Image (tube, helix red, strand yellow):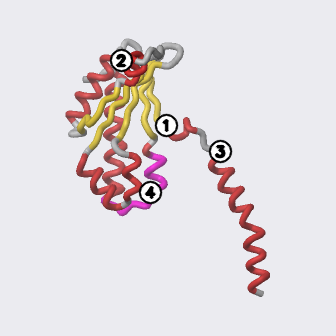
Amino acid sequence: MRKILLSLLIALLPLTFLATQTHAQSMTIADTVLKMPLAEGVSMDDAVESMKLRANTLNFKLVAHLPLYKELESMGVEAKRIEIFQFCDARIANEMIKENIDFSAYLPCRITLIEDQDGKAWLTTLDLNKVIEMADLPPNLMENAVKVRDTIEEIMTAGATGDL
């Protein structure tokens, strides 16, 4: 009987793999990203200032800024504007990492200001809803995860609309 069950499990294993592959293939990289266009009349410099001011108001520290396009230009590579802003609430980050070290891969929260090939400016970030859905968090950490998501989205919205 054991041999029959073992044979059955071995026979079904490829089907399980196929099912997980199909699910993974059905999600595109765009499905993991939150993307906002800059409103008409909002310059990229306005967006940067608005995001910095809003983050400061919300006690979310700008911990890093990478003007990637300038780095590329210094290497002789022509590039549209690409800037990566990294924000963090250190207390929440610490609590999340204490719960599960894997959360460190998502830190700090990043917002990218990017100009597409048509010259349109966008703000992009990881869709934290996807991460929150996957995480099995206790209520207090779930509340913090939602707070981080809402804060990042508020910073992006301020940038996209030029709201000071």
Spatial CA span between label 1 and label 3 = 15 Å
Label 3 CA crowd tier, 10 Å (few <14, some 14–19, many 20+) = few
State which region is magenta: 129-140
Check if mark 3's residue and mark 2's residue have beta carbons within 8 Å: no
Give the Cα separation between the discs numbered 2 and 4.
34 Å
Tell me the residue that label 3 is attached to.
26
**Residue that carries the numbered disc 2 in the rendered image:** 44
Q: Distance between the residues labelled 2 and 1?
A: 20 Å
Farthest residue toward the bottom? 1
* Residue 121 found in image quarter: top left
Give the residue displayed 38% in from the left and 33% down from the top. Answer: 111
Nearer the N terminus, badge 1 or badge 3?
A: 3
Mark 2 / mark 4, whichever is N-terminal: 2
Amino acid type indicated by mark 4: Ala
Amino acid carrying label 1: it is Val
Q: Which mark is first along the chain, 3 or 4?
A: 3
Residue position for label 1: 33
Residue at the spot x=69%, y=62% of the render? 16
Which residue is at the front of the view, 155 or 15? 15
